Image (spheres, helix red, strand yellow):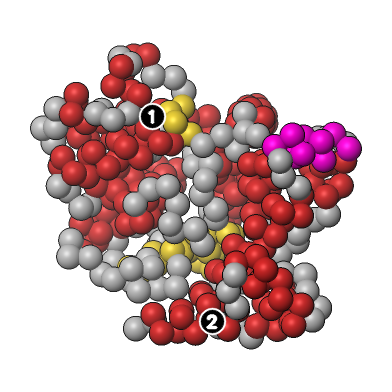
């Protein structure tokens, strides 16, 4: 997956900074946008440039609630073709399904998990240490969700619950102003949820015929982003999305529209093998389970495809140089 950010997000952040009195030259210092006029920015901006811009804006404005303020401005238009696709859905369930399928158009490096429970629909993020500062990134996502749903439903009081994996901030009043009062801090992971019964809420702008057109464009754009990444990156992205399934090499090759022979050769050209990439992802998942979940190690082993916990322990030590027990003990000691 190509690591880039939609240009509207970048332009809105620049507007916020300029409104706060930041000099544009200082704002763009250190990123390639400094030599490009705003009118020359393409449809997407490299993530390293966006990160530099975020860091500069946080430093120059001194505003700790910057992520909330940016998210508040990320409306349907800012989400470009995916935002247009949202508007054509019949109900909120279709919106969530589209979002689950195409959210990488908005944030390629983000990993989200969707849980359709009988009582609540929950969306959570296990990779809270992505390429953006932790609080900034999660605040931005939360405020954007609030703003997008309000725009779709015309309901500013939509009952969204927000959980954050860090302590209550000093600027809690800004959270309450933008997100509402159903806020929870010091949680295991970032989670956004609402009652499942609301998935049936109809959208006033529904247009099934247009939805097909917009969804086809979303699929094309996502394919373009995937094609621009090298094969190892595509493989890692795919394996991370298929958490708990861990397909065989021929299945992954088929998902990437290649024969097993071509796929193996393309990996060899990068000096890598499929098992190496698979082990990297399984190590990531195992470490997160050990640190964030209270599952028995035997259950974690099973989720990662091991029938024997002792085999998992040996594999984990080979992957990371550490033992599952040591990682879990360290996580427990870090817990308040």
- Is residue 46 magenta-colored? no
Percent position of residue 157, x then y:
34, 57
Percent position of residue 137, x then y:
37, 51
- Residue 85 shows in the view: no
Residue at left offset 55%, top offset 55%: 112
- Main SS class of the magenta portion in the image: helix
Residue at left offset 44%, top offset 31%: 46
Residue linked to disc 2: 326
Give the alpha-carbon distance from disc 2 to disc 1, as whole Å. Answer: 44 Å
Looking at the image, residue 246 lies above or below residue 1: below
Q: Give the range drawn in magenta.
A: 261-270
Residue at left offset 50%, top offset 66%: 195
Horizontal side of 310 relative to 117 (left or right) equals right
Residue at left offset 76%, top offset 59%: 246
Looking at the image, residue 245 lies above or below residue 208: below
Percent position of residue 68, x then y:
28, 50
Percent position of residue 321, x then y:
59, 70
Label pair 2/1, CB-CB below 8 angstroms: no
Observer-side mark, 2 or 1, equals 2
Horizontal side of 5 relative to 28 (left or right) equals right
Horizontal side of 324 relative to 257 (left or right) equals left
Residue linked to disc 1: 8
């Amino acid at each position: 997956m190509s690591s880039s950010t939609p240009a509207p997000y970048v332009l809105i952040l620049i507007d916020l900074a300029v409104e706060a009195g930041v000099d544009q030259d200082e704002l763009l210092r250190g990123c390639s946008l400094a030599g490009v006029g705003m009118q020359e920015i393409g449809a997407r901006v490299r993530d390293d440039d966006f990160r530099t811009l975020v860091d500069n804006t946080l430093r120059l404005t001194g505003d700790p609630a910057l992520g909330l303020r940016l998210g508040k401005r990320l409306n349907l238009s800012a989400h470009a073709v995916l935002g247009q696709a949202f508007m054509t859905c019949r109900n909120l369930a279709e919106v969530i399904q589209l979002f689950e399928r195409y959210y990488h158009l908005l944030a390629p490096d983000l990993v989200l998990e969707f849980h359709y429970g009988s009582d609540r629909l929950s969306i959570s993020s296990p990779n809270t240490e992505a390429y953006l500062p932790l609080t900034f990134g999660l605040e931005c996502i939360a405020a954007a969700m609030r703003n997008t749903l309000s725009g779709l439903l015309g309901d500013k009081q939509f009952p969204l619950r927000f959980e954050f994996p860090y302590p209550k901030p000093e600027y809690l009043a800004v959270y309450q102003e933008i997100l509402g009062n159903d806020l929870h801090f010091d949680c295991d992971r970032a989670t956004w949820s609402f009652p499942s019964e609301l998935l049936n809420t109809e959208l006033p702008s529904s247009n099934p015929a247009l939805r097909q057109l917009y969804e086809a464009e979303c699929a094309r754009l996502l394919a373009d982003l995937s094609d621009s990444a090298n094969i190892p990156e595509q493989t890692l992205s795919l394996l991370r999305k298929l958490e708990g399934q861990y397909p065989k090499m021929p299945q992954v090759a088929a998902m990437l529209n290649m024969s097993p022979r071509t796929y193996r050769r393309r990996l060899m050209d990068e000096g890598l093998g499929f098992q190496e990439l698979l082990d990297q992802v399984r190590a990531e998942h195992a470490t997160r389970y050990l640190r964030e979940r209270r599952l028995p190690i035997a259950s974690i082993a099973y989720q990662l495809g091991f029938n024997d916990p002792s085999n998992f322990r040996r594999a984990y030590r080979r992957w990371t140089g550490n033992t599952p027990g040591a990682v879990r003990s360290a996580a427990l000691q870090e817990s308040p």
